[in-house]
Image: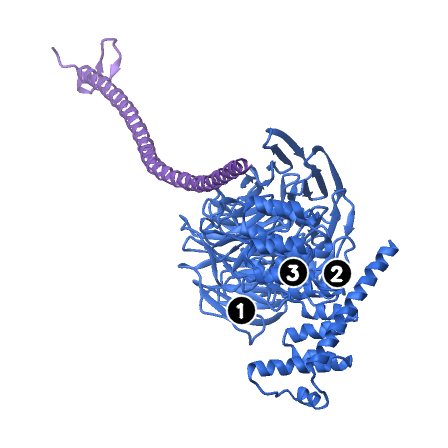
């Protein structure tokens, strides 16, 4: 093939007979490269998106874990305090029971005294009837 | 009895409440660390902020200016003192305006208290100083100074001493600088609050050792509570001194004045820092640590009389139960019930505005009358009428609601009267004086005038308790009194110009009560339960008294019991732990009293024969002698083996004239002067002289003989005989003097005596003839 003077001048014709500065081969490669680059950028973008999503997700999970953790601590504390509360309540009830017991004791003494009076009075009545 | 508590749901302070104080029975002021003063109205259930104080004022204590000042009454409390942490106290008005702020202490002012008549204010500070201020806030003096903070202070009932805390010690310091200070270790921890009641003169203290204690004003411990779970942060006496309230963490307790607890409440309020009773003693308020103000009133108070049982179910409702048939009546009142009393077939209820009188026969139609003053502090009942005591005076009302009388005496303070210092019977009212506790004023209940010449009865010791007997004629009315030494004395109320002869009938008597239907007295003597079946015996025959007693072991009552009442044959005793114990007394003495008062002596003798009881015979002997019923007395004395007395009664019977026998009956009871007066009045001079000769009362015998110029030789003759018998020489100057001029001739004397006796006999005979002719 004869040397193309155009080629020497750095000019080429492509298939569509348009004047080009680059060699068709180079151009093709360039185009390919461009395509590939675009592909690459797309893919990187996609990757970033996916990774972003992942990070978000993980963040959310972390947050949730944190709240759960707090909840657990709270619950544990509550449990502890419930025990204490129960103790206090028990103490209060014990005090009330002691009070009631004292009252009961008072009533018991009163009842005993009254029973004694009853016995005495019955005795008196019996004696009274007998003497008559 | 228990407390019913309530809290306002919506309003509360944002910080802990430090102090509370009542203005009326329905309005309370509270101060809190959120700098607010809130007014709580119980009628409308509203709470309004009175004022917001400056941010640097943290209130600690509040005390309203007393309502009574120098006998004059103010309708409402108008101003109060407020103490704060910055070392100042503030005089504030009802509207919350701070009239005056006074720099008083270094560090916080922990307590501020007006005295009872409002003439002085006392403040106690963290710096350990106690200062007295005038009404307008001028410093009068620094009363005391110590190294530790004074947490609480209280005035004595007569405002002449103060009680304050010093670490674990309590100190009573008189305002008079030279007087003795009383100081004692009271608690095992720091004492946080004290209170001193004006009616019963008892002291209450609570401290960090989680105990509350009751003391008398001499510092003797009367009660110590068991240890609580938390320190006692507040104590308060109810105004009538019957109850007190104790506050602690989540705890509110209602106790009897003897210390045992009626009820315990466990509200969720945090510590109760301050407690206050309303003036009528029906409402209680507490300043709580969580910013709330807790209100409480007393319900389920009970009254019993014979077969009736009355319970205060709500503030304005009472339930009456007849135990015999289980019939239940419900009584409704327009206002809050303040005081009630059930005895002598009547229920008397005082509400804030009215007085209701019910008869136990009819619960449907009470008698209602208006009360002038709201707060009745005491109701006492007798068979025919009842007594109301309020801030203004003492009033006797009949059960028909008529004002019978309102006795008064100089220096009367009605706010401190209690059932121990006032006694009422159907014709007499007795009141112990407060300024001089030895003095008892006696009034005729019908007229309200002082009895006799108006002079009060004065004992040689301070009188602690008085009681009047309830039955029999008013001339025989007797008053029993227990003095500071715990000796029991009996005296007649109406003794017609004579001195009140006080007769001691018991020692170590803690408590006593008269029977409601017969003049029988019961009491607890040391550890013995004693019934004086016929206390009047002491006026007739002192030796007889021990024989008329009924003694029973009182150990079942344990120590310091209180006799509540003696109705019919049943004595009700309240033990120190609060339980009621009953004791039955034989019904015979009451029957005997009944027979004696209606002069049915044969029946009385028959009863004694039937009962075969020595004490009963002794009682009969006393009663018969008191009514000069010699035949019965002879029988009774014979039955208890008092031969000497039987003989004397026989000799009385053989006396030639009525006057002589009356005189000898008086002599029998040991009333020599009265006997002499009786004889002299009847012109029986020789008999009077002979009485003194028989008593070896030579001087008086001679004096009479010389004065009436007769029987001088008789006296001298007997004197000589007496000296001869005992182998003594005459040393009495007067006898020596008269012996010189008088010849002693026994025969002449005998003849003279014989003559006198016949003269007397004749005199008596003509008198009886005359009286029979007159008939």
Disc 3: which residue: B650
Q: Are marks 3 and 2 on the same chain?
A: yes
**Closer to the N terminus: mark 2 or mark 1?**
1
Tell me the quadrant of the picture where the N terminus of chain B can be found. Answer: top right
Q: Colour of chain B?
A: blue
Residue B578, image x, y percentages: 49, 46
Which residue is at 69% across, 46% downward? B600
- Give me the disc on residue A122: none
Query: Relative to B476, does residue B297 appear above or below in the rendering?
Result: above
Asked if residue B637 shows in the view, the reply is yes
Residue B770, image x, y percentages: 86, 59
Of tags 3 and 2, which is closer to the observer? 3
Chain ID at mark 3:
B
- From the viewer's side, name the closer residue of B427 and B377: B427
Disc 2: which residue: B451
Q: CA distance from mark 3 to mark 1?
A: 64 Å
Asked if residue B31 shows in the view, the reply is no
- Give me the disc on residue B173: 1
Residue lying at the far left of the rendered structure: A1
């Amino acid at each position: 093939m004869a040397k193309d003077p155009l080629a020497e001048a750095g000019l080429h014709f492509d298939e569509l007979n348009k004047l080009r500065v680059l060699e068709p081969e180079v151009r093709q490669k360039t185009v390919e490269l461009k395509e590939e680059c675009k592909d690459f950028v797309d893919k990187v973008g996609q990757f970033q998106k996916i990774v972003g999503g992942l990070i978000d997700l993980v963040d959310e999970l972390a947050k949730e874990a944190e709240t759960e953790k707090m909840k657990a601590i709270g619950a544990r504390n509550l449990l502890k305090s419930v025990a204490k509360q129960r103790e206090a309540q028990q103490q209060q009830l014990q005090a009330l029971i002691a009070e009631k017991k004292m009252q009961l004791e008072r009533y018991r003494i009163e009842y005993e005294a009254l029973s004694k009076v009853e016995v005495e009075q019955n005795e008196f009545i019996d004696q009274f009837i007998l003497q008559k | 009895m228990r407390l019913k508590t309530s809290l306002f749901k919506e309003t509360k302070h944002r910080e802990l409440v430090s102090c509370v104080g009542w203005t009326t029975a329905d309005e309370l002021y509270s101060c809190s660390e959120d700098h607010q003063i809130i007014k709580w109205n119980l009628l409308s259930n509203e709470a309004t902020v009175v004022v917001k104080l400056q941010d640097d004022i943290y209130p600690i204590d509040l005390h309203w200016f007393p309502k009574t000042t120098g006998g004059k009454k103010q309708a409402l409390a108008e101003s109060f003192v407020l103490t704060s942490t910055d070392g100042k106290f503030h005089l504030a008005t009802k509207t919350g305006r701070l009239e005056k702020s006074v720099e008083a202490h270094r560090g916080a002012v922990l307590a501020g208290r007006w005295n009872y008549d409002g003439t002085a204010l006392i403040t106690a500070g963290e710096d350990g100083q106690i200062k007295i201020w005038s009404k307008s806030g001028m410093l009068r003096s620094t009363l005391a100074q110590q190294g530790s903070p004074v947490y609480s202070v209280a005035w004595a009932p007569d405002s002449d001493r103060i009680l304050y805390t010093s670490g674990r010690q309590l100190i009573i310091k008189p305002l008079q600088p030279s007087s003795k200070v009383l100081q004692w270790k009271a608690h095992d921890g720091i004492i946080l609050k004290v209170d001193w009641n004006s009616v019963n003169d008892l002291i209450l203290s609570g401290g960090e050792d989680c105990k509350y204690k009751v003391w008398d004003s001499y510092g003797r411990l009367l009660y110590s509570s068991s240890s609580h779970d938390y320190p006692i942060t507040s104590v308060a006496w109810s105004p009538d001194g019957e109850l007190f309230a104790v506050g602690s963490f989540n705890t509110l307790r209602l106790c009897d004045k003897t210390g045992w607890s009626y009820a315990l409440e466990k509200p969720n309020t945090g510590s109760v820092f301050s407690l206050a009773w309303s003036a009528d003693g029906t409402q209680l308020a507490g300043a709580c640590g969580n910013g709330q103000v807790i209100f409480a009133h007393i319900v389920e108070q009970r009254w019993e009389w014979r077969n009736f049982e009355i319970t205060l179910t709500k503030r304005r409702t009472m339930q009456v139960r007849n135990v015999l048939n289980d019939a239940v009546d419900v009584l409704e009142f327009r206002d809050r019930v303040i005081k009630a009393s059930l005895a002598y077939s009547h229920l008397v209820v005082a509400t804030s505005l009215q007085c209701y009188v019910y008869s136990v026969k009819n619960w449907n139609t009470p008698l209602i009358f208006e009360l002038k003053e709201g707060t009745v502090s005491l109701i006492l009942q007798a068979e025919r009428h009842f007594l109301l005591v309020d801030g203004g005076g003492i009033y006797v009302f009949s059960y028909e609601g008529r004002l019978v009388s309102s006795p008064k005496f100089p220096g009367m303070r009605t706010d401190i009267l209690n059932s121990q210092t006032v006694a009422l019977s159907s014709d007499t009212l007795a009141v112990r004086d407060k300024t001089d506790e030895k003095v008892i004023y006696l009034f005729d209940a019908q007229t309200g005038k002082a009895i006799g010449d108006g002079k009060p009865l004065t004992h040689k010791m301070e009188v602690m308790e008085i009681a009047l007997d309830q039955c029999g004629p008013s001339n025989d009315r007797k008053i029993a009194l227990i003095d500071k030494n715990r000796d029991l004395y009996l005296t007649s109320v109406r003794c017609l110009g004579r001195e009140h002869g006080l007769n001691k009938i018991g020692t170590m008597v803690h408590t006593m009560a008269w029977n409601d239907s017969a003049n029988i007295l019961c009491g607890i003597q040391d550890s013995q339960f004693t019934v004086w079946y016929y206390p009047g015996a002491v006026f007739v025959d002192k030796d007889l008294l021990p024989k008329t007693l009924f003694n029973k072991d009182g150990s079942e009552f344990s120590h310091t019991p209180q006799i509540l009442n003696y109705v019919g044959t049943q004595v009700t005793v309240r033990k120190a732990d609060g339980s009621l114990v009953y004791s039955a007394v034989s019904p015979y003495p009451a029957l005997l009293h009944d027979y004696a008062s209606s002069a049915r002596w044969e029946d009385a003798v028959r009863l004694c024969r039937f009962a075969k009881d020595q004490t009963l015979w002794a009682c009969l002997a006393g009663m018969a002698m008191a009514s000069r019923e010699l035949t019965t007395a002879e029988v009774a004395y014979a039955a208890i083996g008092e031969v000497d007395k039987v003989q004397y009664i026989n000799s009385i019977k053989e006396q030639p004239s009525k006057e002589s026998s009356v005189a000898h009956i008086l002599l029998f009871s040991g009333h020599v002067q009265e006997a002499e007066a009786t004889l002299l009045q009847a012109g029986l001079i020789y008999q009077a002289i002979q009485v003194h000769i028989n008593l070896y009362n030579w001087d008086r015998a001679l004096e009479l003989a010389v004065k009436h110029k007769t029987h001088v030789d008789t006296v001298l003759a007997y004197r000589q005989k007496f000296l001869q018998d005992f182998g003594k020489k005459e040393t009495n100057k007067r006898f020596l003097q008269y012996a010189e001029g008088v010849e002693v001739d026994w025969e002449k004397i005998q003849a003279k005596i014989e003559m006198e006796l016949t003269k007397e006999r004749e005199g008596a005979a003509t008198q009886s003839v005359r009286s029979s002719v007159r008939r």
